[in-house]
Amino acid sequence: MGLEVPLLDLKAQYAAIKDDVLRATTGVIERQEFIMGREVGELETAVAGLSRARHGVGCASGTDALLLLLWTLDLKPGDQVIAPAFTFFATAGTIHNTGGTPVLVDIDPATFNVQPEALEAAITPRTRAIVVVDLFGQMAPLERILPLAQRHGLPVLEDAAQAIGARRLIDGTWRIAGELPWAGAFSFFPSKNLGAWGDGGMIVTQDDALAGRLRKLRLHGGAKQYHHDEVGTNSRLDTLQAAVLLAKLPHLARWSAARRERAARYTAAFTGHAEIVPPAVGPANEHIFHQYTIRVPRRDELLAQLRAQGIGCAVYYPLGLHLQPCFAYLGFRPGSLPATEDATRSVLSLPVYPELSDAQQDAVIETVQEFFG
Ligand SMILES: Cc1ncc(COP(=O)(O)O)c(C=O)c1O
């Protein structure tokens, strides 16, 4: 076995920022201010600022960010929410859990993001909202989705769990993830580009009334303790996690730029290999490469070969949400969403973290190239 190359190296990140992050968390510990401490508000302001949104509302996870937002739609049985089938489970699981029926649609095979045509074709009189996902860190084509949603009077929820800080050039202006839709949802799961030391999430929105309602819903439905305007839940962002995230936030743009450089280096090496399809990035996109995902034939064999060489890699995602056993009631069959199913058979995500060295990356490139001869 050659050089070890993990899929992600959070220990290397920690070593680089240890003093700052320990100082930030020690401050919280010394004040013993674990619940809704001042760092939570500071992070909300900072993330809202980054996303050019009027409000940031911290919550317990990316899943809860989606859940709280969908909850505000007061979905009734039979109400439909459209979402792509090729994404992390939470995108559709939260629709189900808030009483809606997920209507799953296919993706654009080049970018892995939702196909606007498929989305529009799925709209019915029962449609209540559209969830788009900025998969792997590249923004969905909002310039096409937002106008069609507006024509049908539907709110758009941007699942930007993987895309904090990603940008897209729309009508000549760079727009950032979370800026344009009804609301955006971020995850601070530890492996994300901006990751906490546990679970965490945040909603961003321009809508004052929505932000006010969300701030109550995450505190059992009451702005004032022991007084409840409606039934909410406990979904707070821990002060300790907010402190970790505040210490990491100044590094985010540089980390994402380093991921882009790593991605460009892979793409340069793989371009021209008939069997390796690098991820497509439109010129109108600043991808943050939460994942660098290639498409290849004999994917499982390549995965085994990489792992045998000590190289971390993963399949995001091996099964479309439309074919998950828990969604059998939606009535999809194999072949229903061909681009999603094709992606599930061919995708492979390679190590793309900022601290990845040239030597480590070369080991990945050589193994992939040798595999295909
Ligand atoms: C696209 C997408 N949506 C939602 C989530 C849920 O976020 P969390 O794991 O913080 O609950 C994730 C992250 O894991 C994700 O990748």
Image (tube, grey):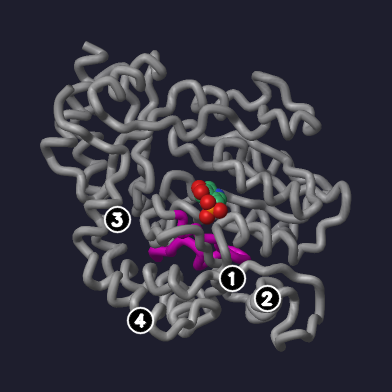
Question: Residue 219's mark?
Answer: 2
The residue lying at 83 percent from left, 50 percent from top is 79
Are the residues tagged 2 and 1 within 8 Å (C-beta)?
yes
Whether 144 is drawn above or below 38: the answer is above
Q: Residue furthest left?
A: 359
SS state under label 1:
loop
Residue 177 forms part of the magenta stretch = yes
Q: How far apart are marks 2 and 1 (CA)?
A: 7 Å
- Of badges 4 and 3, the one in the foreground is 4
* Residue indicated by mark 3: 256
For the residue pair 172 and 184, the one nearer the viewer reads as 184
* Residue indicated by mark 1: 236
- The amino acid type found where label 2 is placed reads Leu
Choose the circle earlier in sequence order: 2 or 1: 2
Whether 111 is drawn above or below 307: the answer is below
- The amino acid type found where label 1 is placed reads Arg
Q: How far apart are marks 4 and 3 (CA)?
A: 27 Å
- Graded by Cα atoms within 10 Å as few (under 14), some (14 to 19) or many (20 or more), the crowding at tag 4 reads some
Q: Which residue lies furthest to the top in this view?
A: 373
The residue lying at 70 percent from left, 85 percent from top is 223
Residue stretch rendered in magenta on the structure: 172-189
* Residue indicated by mark 4: 27
- The amino acid type found where label 3 is placed reads Ser
SS state under label 2:
loop
Choose the circle earlier in sequence order: 1 or 4: 4
The residue lying at 60 percent from left, 62 percent from top is 65
Q: Can residue 8 be seen in this view?
A: yes
SS state under label 3:
helix
